[in-house]
Amino acid sequence: MTRSATVLVVSTRAAAGVYEDRTGPVISAWLRERGFEVTLEVTPDAEVGETLARLLAEHPSVLLTTGGTGVSPDDRTPEATRALLDAELPGIAEEVRRRGTAVTPTAVLSRAFAGVAGRTLVMNLPGSSGGVRDGLAVLDGILDHAIAQIAGAGDHGAR
């Protein structure tokens, strides 16, 4: 069975072609290495809510965003994400921030969320390459287990 994943780059400048996003392809490649069929989309910050809702309606196993998680006036990804979640997974976002602040003190400014929307694992990653690396490192150890649990698997990893 092919697993599906969607990567959403949230960047007004990348959507307008002002610069080439480098984080979306990194996330997409990481997911493909783990057996996912990946769709990559770029959206302006102002349209993140509508785009997230549309992409979630396609029911991917995983939806990862990159960008729009900071404190600038245009950053809306966390609010748009939270509005669509059925359950939050705060430990994931907290661990990404913890790892990031060990290297870059400004990582603590990330307002990213992780959670479940329907049967989709949703996670916001920062728009920086370092933040993406931190986020993917956190997901690496839990992704398959989280997807299985969201799908209703009965094995909770008991020891």
Image (cartoon, grey):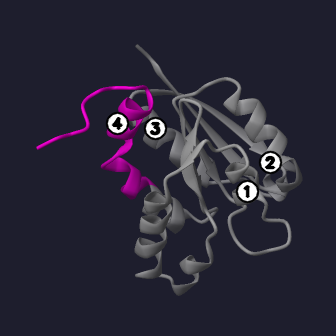
Tag 2: Cα neighbours inside 10 Å, few (<14), some, or many (≥20)?
A: many
Which mark sits nearer the N-terminus, 3 or 4? Answer: 3
Q: Quadrant of the C terminus?
A: top left
The amino acid type of the residue labelled 2 equals Val
Residue at image x 39%, y 40%? 146
SS class of the residue under badge 3? helix
SS class of the residue under badge 4? helix
Pointer 2 with pointer 1, Cβ within 8 A: yes
Which mark sits nearer the N-terminus, 1 or 4? Answer: 1
Residue at image x 50%, y 62%? 93
SS class of the residue under badge 1? helix
Q: Which residue is mark 3?
A: 31
Q: Which residue is mark 1?
A: 77
Alpha carbons under labels 1 and 3: distance apart = 21 Å
Tag 4: Cα neighbours inside 10 Å, few (<14), some, or many (≥20)?
A: few
Alpha carbons under labels 3 and 2: distance apart = 21 Å
Alpha carbons under labels 4 and 2: distance apart = 26 Å
* Magenta region, residue range: 136-159
Residue 144, label in figure: 4
